[in-house]
Structure formats: structure tokens, C-alpha cells
Amino acid sequence: MRLLLIFLTIPIIEIALFIQVGGWIGLWPTLGLVVLTAVAGAALMRTQGLRALDRLRAAFEGGRDPTGPIADGAMILVAGMLLLTPGFFTDTLGLLLLLPPVRAAIYRRFGALLSVRVAAAGPRPRPAARSGVDHPIEAEYEVLDDVPPSQRGASGWTRPQP
């Protein structure tokens, strides 16, 4: 029900604002303003998004909690969607979300609702030896690179050469 109310209310607000602003400044300036806010918002979203990506990368490399940069990136993405939606109300909300203090306030208010689970990728670490030996095992070996295969003999680790 709440989502239906949002989908009905926002277009009504946008239409009312288009009518009001169009009455004040005219049709073409109104359309120009809508296009200008979309272009400016896209440029701001790009620079802010790249900064958020750098902060996320630094958090991963430093082994820190990435929740803040992830939330920042998500809010910047939502801001971009709002800015690309034609209208003055959505543009205002999008521009507000691009302001770092506004994002920080939203994160402080709703940050407790976020949780991050960390998963590691790559080869799994080998389990420690069962004997608990942490030192190298010494062994004797003989380098056979210079010995022809016919003179090497069978060691159990190699197949006999034909």
C-alpha cells in the first residue's frame, strides 16, 4: 500500500511543479532547466561515484568495514536514478543525496539496519599439519637434470623412459 501511495504521489507532485514553474518562467526555460539538472546530476553522480568506488577499494585493501562506502555508493546510485527522472521534485531529492553531509545523516539514521557479511575468494589456506610441526622437513636429494634419462633409473616417482 505504501509503495502504491509513493507511485501515485510523486507523479502528482511533479505535474504540479511543472505547471507552476512553467507558468512562472515559460515552457522552454522549464524544459531547459529539466535537461540542465539531468546533465549536471549525471556529471556529479559520476565524480561522486568514482570517489565512493575509491573509498570502497581502500576499505577492502585495508581490511576495514566496507559498509560505509557501500551505502555511499548505493545512495549515489539512487541519486543518479532520481536525477535522470524528469521532474523538479525528484531532481531536488537526487541533488540532496549527492551532498556528502546528507548521505552521512541518512547513514547515521539507518546505518544500524545494514549488515555486511564478508566472504573470501581465492584458494583456501591449507590446514596445519596434524603433527603440529611448523619447521621444514629435511631430506636428501640429487639433481638429475644433467644425467641422461637412460641412466636415471626408476625412483617410484618417475615413469621409466622408453
Image (tube, helix red, strand yellow):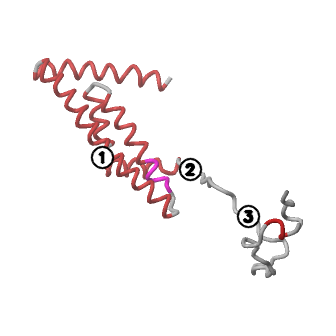
In the figure, residue 38 lies in which quadrant? top left
> What amino acid does circle 1 point to?
Thr
Up-down: is 49 above or below 7?
below
Given the current orientation, which residue lies at the most extreme left position? Answer: 25
Earlier in the chain: of badge 1 and badge 2, it is 1
Name the residue located 84 percent from the left edge and 63 percent from the top edge.
158
| 3 or 2: mark nearer the eye | 3
User: In the picture, residue 155 is in which quadrant?
Assistant: bottom right
Write down the region rendered in magenta: 66-71
x 41%, y 22%: residue: 7
Q: Which of label 3 and label 1 is nearer to you?
A: 3
Residue that mark 3 sits on: 126
* Mark 3 and mark 2: Cα distance apart in space: 29 Å
Is residue 59 shown left or right of residue 132? left
Q: From the viewer's side, name the closer residue of 11 and 39.
A: 39
User: Which mark is nearer the camera, 1 or 2?
Assistant: 1
Q: Earlier in the sequence, mark 3 or mark 2?
A: 2
Give the residue displayed 39% in from the left and 19% down from the top.
8
For label 1, count other residues whose C-alpha is less than 10 Å away and answer few (under 14), some (14-19) or many (20+).
few
In contact (CB < 8 Å): disc 1 and disc 2: no
Local crowd size for mark 2, using a 10 Å CA cut-off: few (<14), some (14–19), many (≥20)? few
Q: Which mark is residue 47?
A: 1
| Quadrant showing the C terminus | bottom right
Along the line of sight, which residue is nearer the eye, 133 or 13? 133
Viewer-proximal residue among 114 and 150: 150
The three-letter code of the residue at mark 2 reads Ser
How many labels sit on residues? 3
